[in-house]
Image (tube, rainbow, N blue to C red):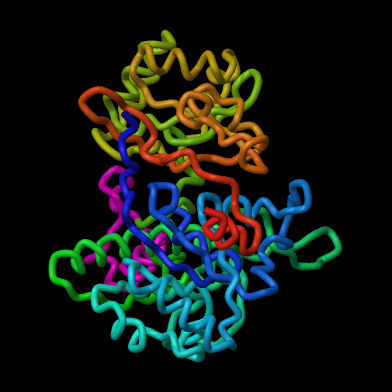
C-alpha cells in the first residue's frame, strides 16, 4: 500500500506571478494540493527567461510542477465567489505578488479569515509590505544586489554587467516562506486561529548572507573587544569568504585534471594529510594551531601543496581523502555537477519525458520502519493555464 505524502491533506490556494510562486512548489513537492489561480491571460512566467522547453519556460515547469491551474477573472463578482469557495476548505492562501493585490478584489486577509478563521494567509513579494521600497518593481537579481551578495563586474570596454552568480533571494525567500507557512498551519490546527504572514525576498537574501553582514557589524565595535581568530594571532580577517583568499591549508588547488578544495584547518586533519602523502616533515615544520588554522599567507607551504595536489586526479584525491581521513571536496560547476557520482546517487532526475524538462527533486529524504526514500512525491507536469479546472470538471 502506498503511503500518503507528508503533506497530503494540506490545501493551498495560490495567486502568483513569476518566481515567488516557488513558495508553494515546496509544499506541492511534499504532497500538498496546490491550486494556482490565474487570470484569463495566464501567468506570463511561461514565457520568461531561458531555456524554453518545447514552447514553455523551464522557470514555469519547475516552479509550478505538481500544481493545479484554475483560470478566474477576479474582476467579475462570480469569479470572486468561486475563489471564496476554494478558500472555505483551504489551509493556506498564498499571495505571491505585490502586497494588497488580492485585497483590491475583496479577497484580502480580513475578508478571507471571515470565511475561514483557521486560514493562514501569506504574502511574498520583492521588498515586503513596508519600507520605502515596498512599491518598487523588481526581479530576482535585485534582491541579491540589494543584499550585497552580487557585485558589479566590468568588461574590457569598461561597461558594467551582471556577473554569473547563484541566485539567493528568489530561492531562499520561497523556502523560508514555506517553513513559516507550515509553522503557522500547525499553530492554526492547534488553536483554531489562522494568521497573516508576509515576507520580502530581499529580506531572505540578506538573512542568508548573515555571516558577512553580521561580521561587518561586529567589526564596528572596538578592536580589543571584537578580534580575529586565535590561529591568526587575533588579527581580523575580511568577513566571510573574503577572508579565505590568503588561506593555504584551506584553499583550492589544481589536480592533474581539474581542481579540488583542501580544508585541513584542524590540526588533526593536517597531520593525517601529511602522513598520508608521505610528507611528515611538513607537519613538523608547520604544525599549526589545533583549530581554524589556514596557514594564512604561507607561500612556501602553498608551493609545496600545489606540487602535491598536481600529482593525482580530482577523483583520486577524493577517494584518497576518504580513505585517509582528511577533508578534500570536489570543485564542480553547474554544468559538470550532474556527472558527479555523489550527485547521481542523491538526485534522481524528474525526466523531461514526464515533466517537460529535466529537474531536480525536493532534496529531503525520510525513513519509515521499512523504507527510506525521497520525501517528495513524483510531481506532475506543470499545468497549462486552467487545466486543473478542466480536469476537475471532467470528473
Residue 19 quadrant: bottom right
As drawn, the residue found furthest toward the front would be 395
Q: Whole-percent x and y of residue 279?
A: 41, 12
Q: Is residue 166 above or below residue 262?
A: below
Q: In the displayed structure, does residue 365 sit left or right of residue 255?
A: left
Where residue 75 appears, x then y in whole percent? 59, 88
Q: Which residues are magenta?
A: 208-235
- Judged left or right of residue 206, residue 234 is left
Q: Nearer the viewer, residue 243 or 240?
A: 240
Q: Is residue 222 magenta?
A: yes
- Front residue of this view, candidates 317 and 381: 381
- The answer to whether residue 89 is left or right of residue 387 is left
Residue sitting farthest toward the top: 278
* Residue 300 seen from this side: no
**x 26%, y 47%: residue:** 230
Position of residue 150 measured from the top left corner of the image (x, y, whole percent): 58, 62
The structure residue drawn at horizontal position 33% and vertical position 46%, both measured from the top left corner, is 232
Quadrant where the N terminus sits is top left
Instruction: Please give the name of the residue rendered at 33% of the width and 59% of the height, measured from the top-left corner.
Output: 179
Q: Position of residue 190 (x, y in %)?
A: 14, 65
Figure check: 90 above or below 272: below
Magenta-colored stretch includes residue 357: no
Nearer the observer, 145 or 143: 143
Pick out the residue farthest to the right.
157
Amino acid at each position: 500500500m502506498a503511503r500518503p505524502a507528508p503533506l497530503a491533506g494540506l490545501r493551498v490556494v495560490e495567486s502568483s506571478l513569476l518566481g515567488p510562486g516557488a513558495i508553494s512548489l515546496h509544499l506541492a513537492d511534499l504532497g500538498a494540493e496546490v491550486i494556482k489561480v490565474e487570470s484569463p491571460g495566464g501567468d506570463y512566467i511561461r514565457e520568461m527567461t531561458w531555456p524554453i522547453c518545447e514552447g514553455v519556460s523551464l522557470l514555469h515547469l519547475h516552479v509550478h510542477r505538481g500544481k493545479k491551474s484554475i483560470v478566474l477573472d477576479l474582476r467579475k463578482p462570480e469569479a470572486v465567489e468561486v475563489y471564496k469557495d476554494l478558500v472555505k476548505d483551504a489551509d493556506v492562501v498564498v499571495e505571491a505578488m505585490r502586497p494588497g493585490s488580492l485585497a483590491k478584489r475583496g479577497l484580502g486577509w480580513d475578508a478571507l479569515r471571515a470565511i475561514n478563521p483557521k486560514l493562514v494567509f501569506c504574502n511574498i513579494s520583492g521588498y515586503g509590505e513596508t519600507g520605502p521600497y515596498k512599491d518598487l518593481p523588481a526581479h530576482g537579481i535585485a534582491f541579491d544586489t540589494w543584499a550585497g551578495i552580487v557585485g558589479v563586474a566590468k568588461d574590457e570596454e569598461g561597461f558594467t554587467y551582471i556577473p554569473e552568480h547563484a541566485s539567493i533571494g528568489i530561492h531562499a525567500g520561497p523556502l523560508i516562506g514555506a517553513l513559516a507557512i507550515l509553522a503557522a498551519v500547525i499553530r492554526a490546527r492547534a488553536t483554531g486561529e489562522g494568521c497573516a504572514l508576509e515576507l520580502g525576498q530581499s529580506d531572505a537574501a540578506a538573512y542568508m548572507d548573515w555571516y558577512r553582514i553580521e561580521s561587518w557589524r561586529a567589526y564596528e565595535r572596538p578592536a580589543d573587544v571584537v578580534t580575529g581568530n586565535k590561529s591568526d594571532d587575533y588579527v581580523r580577517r575580511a568577513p566571510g569568504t573574503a577572508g579565505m583568499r590568503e588561506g593555504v591549508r584551506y584553499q583550492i588547488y589544481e589536480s592533474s585534471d581539474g581542481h579540488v578544495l583542501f580544508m585541513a584547518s584542524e590540526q588533526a586533519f593536517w597531520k593525517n594529510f601529511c602522513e598520508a602523502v608521505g610528507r611528515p616533515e611538513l607537519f613538523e615544520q608547520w604544525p599549526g594551531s589545533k583549530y581554524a588554522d589556514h596557514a594564512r599567507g604561507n607561500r612556501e607551504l602553498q608551493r609545496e601543496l600545489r606540487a602535491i595536489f598536481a600529482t593525482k586526479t580530482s577523483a583520486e584525491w577524493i577517494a584518497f581523502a576518504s580513505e585517509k581521513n582528511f577533508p578534500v571536496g570536489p570543485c564542480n560547476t553547474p554544468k559538470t555537477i550532474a556527472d558527479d557520482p555523489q550527485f547521481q546517487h542523491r538526485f534522481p532526475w524528474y525526466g523531461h519525458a514526464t515533466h517537460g524538462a529535466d529537474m531536480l527533486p525536493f532534496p529531503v529524504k525520510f525513513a519509515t520502519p521499512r523504507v527510506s526514500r525521497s520525501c517528495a512525491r513524483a510531481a506532475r507536469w506543470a499545468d497549462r493555464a486552467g487545466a486543473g479546472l478542466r480536469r476537475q470538471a471532467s470528473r
